[in-house]
Amino acid sequence: MQVKRRRFLFGSLMAGASVLPARAGTQQPQTPSGDGVSVYKFGAVGDGRTDDSEAIQRCLSYAARARCRRVLVGANHVITDLDLTGLYYGGLIIEGTNTTHQPVPGHANFIVRGTASQGLDISGTSGLVLRNLTFAGLPSDAPRSAVFASRVAGANESYGHSFENVRCYGRFTCAALYNYAGEVWSFRQGDYRNDAGFATLYFTTFNSLGLKSKFRETDAHVRPLTVTTLGNLTVYYNARDGAAIWFEQDPGTPPDATVQQIKIEDCYVVARGQARATFRFSDIMGNVRIVACRDESFARGDSDAAVTCILVDGMRNLRGLTLEDNVFFPRSFVIDALAPVQDYRAAGNYVWNKPRVWRFTQLANATHATLYGNELFVVTGRADRVEVSAVNRQTGVNNVRMTLRS
């Protein structure tokens, strides 16, 4: 039913959808449908001081109505909230034309400011591409997020977005990127940093942080399939008790209604500021793959590094966790699974530091081996408790304790 409904939405809305209205009393350039349009043609200044929200909103509204292919964005546009919600046709590209190689405070394509601001709201929008864009959250006037999305009434999801060479940095009091039940998102090459809040990248169907779209009514009854791919990203987090990358699922979701498919590949991730974990998976039912990533939160022995590289918490059974060819620098735990895990595979991971502890509250159908220390265990049934730790870093002698359930 979910797939059929989405196809109907795309078909009917592509044929004659209502899109973002143009602001009353504004002149719109006569750009042919399908061509790119620049925010400067709508009055954007880009001096790092003037609020360009209204000018850029006029540009987005026109692009939606005229079916433009691209919106071109320059540098240093100060914004609060931009409405790009309910846009059901696919393929709109928002592209930066002037980004910094090394971002500094107060310089970006979009400078997001205002404690109530949520940046670019793409709730209920499908097929959006963000390319070569930099977002900055001002430390002195930190917004809630840089990019925000939530499921909305009549659309049910924010579907099929692509982030290509996107950067977020600065302070965001919730998360740099905030995705409430958006489906099938992909990230290729990017740099994300948050020095505040609960996470740098936050993906949820539960929304424990409580943000909603300012422009669209939230549909609280849909439990969509979510597929997320993160590749070639640098993700940095520096705040207490949060996580660099946090995936969260509604614990009340029926087991056959929502399946998370998460792949994190070739990413460099750091969490400090006494963070709780680098990666956090809360009530995720599966499947999670972390491949060829490097967590250097504790690489230099920083006293404020994240306690755990990978935290699995909540009450649901994580059905499918694979760790391959990663490098971990744990402060205390490589993995701390407070929730049950089944179908677990770990191979080819390289772990530095001591103690190197892998702890599972409950584990089923598992094979585990690492390169450094040669840790190895197999659980073909179910174990009520498994803990693996290296007791001697020089010789690689291991200590494996398992309490097996008969």
Image: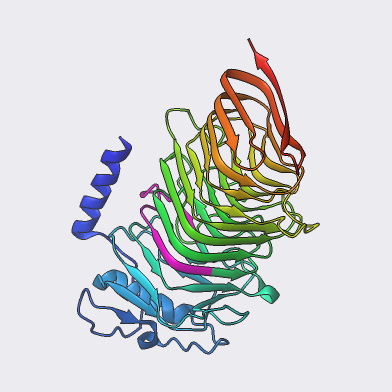
Residue at the farthest front position = 395
Whole-percent x and y of residue 241? 73, 51
Q: Is residue 62 above or below residue 126?
A: below
Residue nearer the viewer, 59 or 292: 292
Whole-percent x and y of residue 334? 67, 42
Residue nearer the viewer, 366 or 226: 366
Whole-percent x and y of residue 273? 75, 59
Q: Is residue 229 above or below residue 255?
A: below
Q: Is residue 85 highlighted in magenta?
A: no
Residue at the farthest top position = 406
Q: Residue at x 45, y 73 (%)?
A: 133
Q: Does 144 sit left or right of 227 as displayed?
A: right
Residue 249: tell me if it is visible. no
Residue nearer the viewer, 359 or 95: 359
Q: Residue at x 59, y 70 (%)?
A: 169
Q: Quadrant of the N terminus?
A: top left
Q: Does 99 sit left or right of 199 as displayed?
A: left
Q: Which residues are magenta?
A: 148-167
Q: Is residue 32 above or below residue 81?
A: below
**Dividing the picture into quarters, in which one does residue 83 lie?**
bottom left
Q: Does 245 sit left or right of 329 as displayed?
A: left
